[in-house]
Amino acid sequence: MTVQPSAPAPVLVLQSERPQDGPLVDALVDRAFGPGRFTKVSERVREFATFAPELSMCAWTPDAREGGRLLGCARMWRVRVGGRPVMFLGPFAVEQGERNAGFGGRLIARACEAAAAAGESHVLLVGDEPYFSRVGFTRAGGREVVMPGPVDQRRVLVRGLQPEAGELAGSVGPI
């Protein structure tokens, strides 16, 4: 039996979100989620959270002549859970034609690496455990987290960033 080598990961430029990236990121999120996203609990969190552009990541094509093309984004926000400062991840989006290329996992991993390097203890998100468990998120860490609105508690996921991080418990609120 011959084993085929896996294809190399596509070349991407991953960098923190810059002020001039905002309109492109907003347009990507609109295409990915549409207006229905405004009814979700994650939007309630972003209404009071503090945006952290230095920890938010954008994935660009490496075409320097054209300035690159935005392929994905993972935004990070500062919140508290039970009085403890943590990061909230979302929205996270990848262009429709670029999904299944591994960009999403790389974006999330890089955003979490940046948060860990900044000394943050946890990243919290609302999402599908089968997808996000590949990048270290678990439902167990979020079972005692109270979101500011209705949510399927099985979708509240947490990734500890420091060895002594422990579990989170309490209500999500502003920093």
Image (cartoon, grey):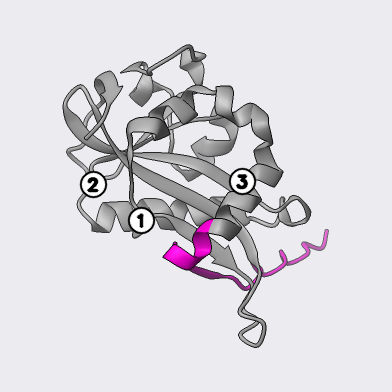
Q: Earlier in the sequence, mark 3 or mark 2?
A: 3
Question: Which type of secondary structure does the marked residue at label 3 adopt?
Answer: helix
Callout 1, which amino acid? Leu
Q: Which residue is mark 1?
A: 55
Q: Which residue is mark 2?
A: 120
Quadrant of residue 118 within the rendered picture: bottom left
Position in image of residue 64 (x %, y %): 61, 85
Within-10-Å neighbours for mark 3: few <14, some 14–19, many 20+: many
Q: Which residue is mark 3?
A: 29
Which residue range is magenta in the image?
A: 1-22
Position in image of residue 6 (x %, y %): 71, 64
Callout 3, which amino acid? Val
Between the residue at mark 1 and the residue at mark 3, the CA separation in whole angstroms equals: 17 Å
Asked if the magenta segment contains residue 21, the reply would be yes
Question: Which type of secondary structure does the marked residue at label 2 adopt?
Answer: loop
The quarter of the image holding the N terminus is bottom right
Q: Residue at x 60, y 56 (%)?
A: 72
Q: Earlier in the sequence, mark 2 or mark 1?
A: 1
Look at the numbered discs 2 and 1 and tell me whether their residues touch, using CB distance below 8 Å.
yes
Q: Is residue 71 left or right of residue 152?
A: right
Position in image of residue 19 (x %, y %): 43, 64
Furthest-right residue in view?
1
Question: Which type of secondary structure does the marked residue at label 1 adopt?
Answer: loop
Between the residue at mark 3 and the residue at mark 2, the CA separation in whole angstroms equals: 25 Å
- For the residue pair 149 and 8, the one nearer the viewer reads as 149
Q: Is residue 44 left or right of residue 93?
A: left
Q: Residue at x 20, y 52 (%)?
A: 119
Between the residue at mark 2 and the residue at mark 1, the CA separation in whole angstroms equals: 10 Å
